[in-house]
Amino acid sequence: MQIQEQKKSVGFETFFKYTVLFLGMSLAIFSVFFIQGKTFIWQNDGFHQHYPFFREYLTILRNFFQTGQWQSWDWNIGLGADTLVSYGYYVVGDPFVYLALLFPKGSEEFAFHVVMLVRIWCVGASFLFYARKMNLSHRGALMGSLMYAFSHPVIYNVVRHPFFIHPMIFFPLLCLGIEKVFKKESGIFFTLMVAISAASNFYFFYMLTWMVLLYALVRYFSLEKGKSWKSFLKWFAYFVGLYLIGLLIASGIFIPLVYGFINASRSPGSPPISLFVYPLRYYGLLVINSLTPGTIFWTIGGLSIVSIFSLPFLIRHRKQRAGLFWTLVALGVMLLFPIFGSFMNGMSGPYNRFSFIVPFYMALATIYFMENIQDLTNSDVTWIRRLMIAYSVLYISATLITNDYILYLTPVILGWAIYGAVNYTQNNKLAKVSFQRILTVFVLLNMTANAIIFYAPFGKNAVSGTENYGTIDDTYSKVFNGVEQNLPTDSQYRIGVTSHNNHVRNQYAYINKPGTNSYASLTNGAVAEFAQFLEASSYQIIQPLRNGIDDRRIVNQSLGVKYILTERKYADYLPSDYTINPELSVVDSDMIVAETENEAPFAYVETNGLSHAEAQKLHPVQREQLLTDAVILEDDSKANLATPAEFSELDIYEGQWREAEHIRGQENLSLNEPMEITVDEANSQITLTFDRPEELIGQEAFIYFENIEFTPPKASFGKDTSTAYRLKVDYNNQSKGVLQSDRYTFSSYFKRENILIHLNEVEEAEDALTVTFQNAGDYSFENVSVVSRPFDEEQATHEAQIKKEHALEIDSFTDEQIEGSVEVSEEGMLVTNIPYTKGWQAYVDGQKVPAEKVNIGFVGVPISAGEHTIEFVYQTPFLKVGVAMSIFGLIALAGYELIYRRYLQKSSE
């Protein structure tokens, strides 16, 4: 890929002009946000993850610099979580986040945007550093840097995932490190870039590893033609050594994050689609999106039309630029088959996020075309004209179908203008230097237009999906309208919400109150197992305990949820045993505070136990009851506890399904038997009539759909068949829906085998329950049942009192350390509300004892009869090991570089 050195090479002038043009283009592009009063913060992940994590991490850093104390654990992330793991996926290894420390506290939102602009500038700057090493011309590198910095993967991720931009910065620099090694220069730069990339984000580091390997192999065989395999193996070993040392240097962050990822709730599994062919729609959009801003399966297009012009020229000169040609061919093939997308995505769903690499190579191809315009032949011009005609027909057709004139006609107009300049130059009527300047201007206009069309209301209006500037901190801090400030601060408890408070996600850190929910890409896998064990209908992969855990009383109380905060209109969704506290609620506000006296203590001793395997055999409602009656032990637990005498029996109800319009197959169907129906129209309803509805009064009721199979109607030709469906149930003043996500939403997809919906305590006899099928299709249920358990307030109070009598008396409670004492009359298990992770170490009477996983997802400690002092101490798993490996890596780098390079140079002579 090395291009002949030009008279004017990349230097200070190139960087200066790039910076000036960058500022001008940024002003034109991002003025859309200023005019609209919008931020770069997406209303989904941006609002719920990226910005709040950015802000909270800065708070942790500032506190560290002020006190010297690092906060390893935060009780306000979900049920409590490791800060390095929780924030590491987004911000810990992001070198740009640390620039925000230059801004005063309270200006985080402004700093977030400045940091984003710095990221974008660095994308183009990294390309220029690479271009200088490759002896590309000043004009070619300038044009290429603009194509790369404002390519659609960058523009798209400005408002989607900021850290997705990082690999576009690191890849040219990694390639630069490879070039330095091939030129017999130091390998230190390559190693340090490996370290920075690995520490920044392990997910993209995986992709970068394979892309860098491809680059290095292509470059080696381009530069070292005719060399022996022995020589190749020496070079390969040298690079592997440098790579591994870079990984060692990054281990202080990399190793704990990998541990967190392995033990997170996000378990990819095998993709639920064919790995050999995408839906037909994908291939059409792959072409459509190539020159217009768009994405499908994270294959991001929006290239400059100039880059398409370079392809015929590159194909004809492929022998001179074989490496570049075959790399683009390989990338093209990878985009055609899902198996490559799955492999690059860690063998999960085929999201083609590796396509961020395509603009880099297309920029190089365009530079090659620009610098060798004098070699253009009539045949090349003919093929360029044919491409323009094909794209013109395609985009004009798209314009007629969609009426989106700006989106599809802009590249056509620019393309024909550029074609005119090419044709004019080819006829020797325009000097090469003039052509290069004109081409750069067209690239500038093209990339600016693409970005504005993507953001602006008259285009794809991506700006409408972002938050209003100056509102985010206020929105987060006022999630409960300040009512949480009325709660006591002298005890350990959690606050919860109802099933209708989906907007409450990561706000607990803002209000400094421990809750139950979090929304993060890396969430404790043990907590996810707990939610799945209980078959919580609200469960999602990155939100295991969301939406009040479907208002289930025992789960909330077992987690220490003393207060539930919600809007007054959702008072009917409060779990049994939670009553509105008028003194804590705000009279002139819609927010209310409900309280229970029967929440479980933070830690207590339980003497009854049941193995995980035996507990799994129970109905999910009985499993929830176990949280009151016993402790659930792992199958390999060494604890010797008594088995509960009996399990509470569930009441099972009888009823019939009424015939319903637009639903076939429901005739003569009853509860407690298989059910197979065809729903012809979306939002069709079927009603269940109970035989003896009065028997439900005073019961906590549930409806349970078991072994669900759903087959959607066949889609019309060229359209995807969505496998998503939602069931909504209305009964007892409750309206609750459960979503099965579509199989193509790979990040959040998991198949729901069963759906359990809590209908709360029934106060009045209602004979009808309505199920709404919000999606048409064929539904099959192995069984549909309505079950209940009685709610006895005195019994609930008695059970809670027993736990409190055996509770750990806490003397000291901080983020990473808990101390207390407990006295028990017989052997038992100290059950805590601490989410299970190997980072928590337990000490009984000063002696370290192995902690166990109990109740599926929490920390427990076997304890003997008597009086004991207990201490729990937290340290991020593998952090010390990782830091030691980092230090060793820095030492190893110097010795490896000195010894191996000498050996390599000597053997090459």
Image (tube, grey):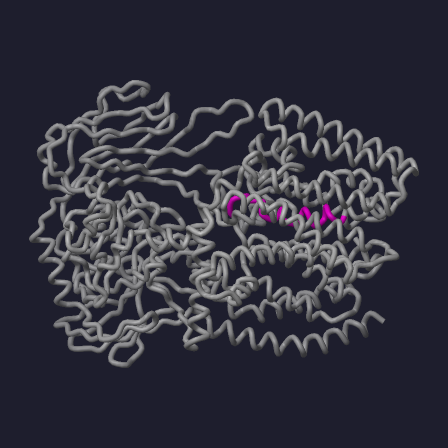
Image spot of residue 36 (x, y percent) = 51, 43
Residue 203 in the magenta stretch? The answer is no
Image-based side of 339 in relation to 614, left or right = right
Image-based side of 53 in relation to 366, left or right = left
User: Residue pushed farthest bottom?
Assistant: 846
Instruction: Please give the name of the residue rendered at 66% of the width and 65% of the height, measured from the top-left corner.
Output: 240
Front residue of 102 and 67: 102
Q: Please name the predominant secondary structure of the magenta segment in the image.
A: helix
Q: Write down the quadrant of residue 182 in the picture.
A: bottom right
Image spot of residue 366 (x, y percent) = 77, 45
Front residue of 686 and 673: 686
Q: Write down the quadrant of residue 392 in the picture.
A: top right
User: Residue pushed farthest left?
Assistant: 794
User: Residue pushed farthest front?
Assistant: 35
Q: Quadrant of the C terminus?
A: bottom right
User: Residue pushed farthest right?
Assistant: 428
Front residue of 404 and 737: 404
Image spot of residue 683 (x, y percent) = 34, 26
Highlighted magenta segment, given as a residue range:
348-364
Instruction: Please give the name of the residue rendered at 19% of the width and 41% of the height, measured from the top-left corner.
Output: 572
Instruction: Please give the name of the residue rendered at 37% of the width and 67% of the height, measured from the top-left corner.
Output: 73
